[in-house]
Amino acid sequence: MHTSRSTDIDVREIHEHLNMTQAAFSETFGIPIPTLKKWEARKRVPEDPAKAYLMVIDKNPAAVKRALQ
């Protein structure tokens, strides 16, 4: 998992690890770009459901893509 602290998810690191731009990550996983930008700038932090979703994306992006089809 790509975290800087145990409770802190690094969203930029996740989408870069997946070789995805913000736009591609947003479109693929249904997260608005303004939300991604705020998370990446640390102006907001993902709440628990979003954090869980990001953790699943990080660990098994193919499963999430299949589920969203």
Image (tube, rainbow, N blue to C red):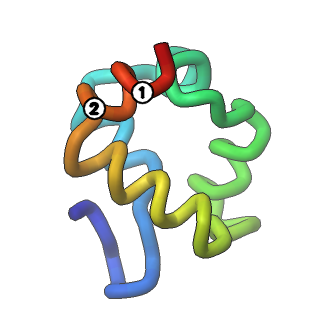
Name the residue beneath numbered marker 2: 63
Quadrant of the image occupied by residue 60: top left
Q: Quadrant of residue 9?
A: bottom left
| Mark 2, secondary structure of its residue | helix
Quadrant the N terminus occupies: bottom left
Q: Give the residue displayed 21% in from the left and 50% down from the top.
A: 59
Q: Is residue 64 left or right of residue 17?
A: right
- Residue identifier under label 1: 67
Q: Which residue is drawn at 51% across and 65% down?
A: 51
Q: Do the residues labelled 1 and 2 touch (CB within 8 Å)?
A: yes
**Placement of 33 over or under 39, stated as above or below:** above
Q: How crowded is mark 1: few (under 14 residues within 10 Å), some or many (20 or more)?
A: few
Query: Which residue is located at x 59 percent, y 17 percent?
Result: 27
Q: On the rendered structure, is 9 left or right of 56? A: right
25 to 60, vertically: above or below:
above
Where's residue 50, x and y in %?
59, 59
Residue 2 - label: none
Q: What is the x, y in percent for residue 35?
A: 74, 45
Circle count: 2
Q: Is residue 19 above or below residue 8?
A: above
Gap between marks 1 and 2 measured at Cα: 6 Å
Q: Callout 2, which amino acid? A: Ala
The kind of residue tagged 1 is: Ala
Q: Is residue 20 above or below residue 49?
A: above
Q: In which quarter of the image is residue 4?
A: bottom left
Residue 65 at x, y percent in the picture: 38, 23
Q: What SS does tag 1 mark?
A: helix
Q: Give the x, y percent position of residue 18.
A: 26, 30
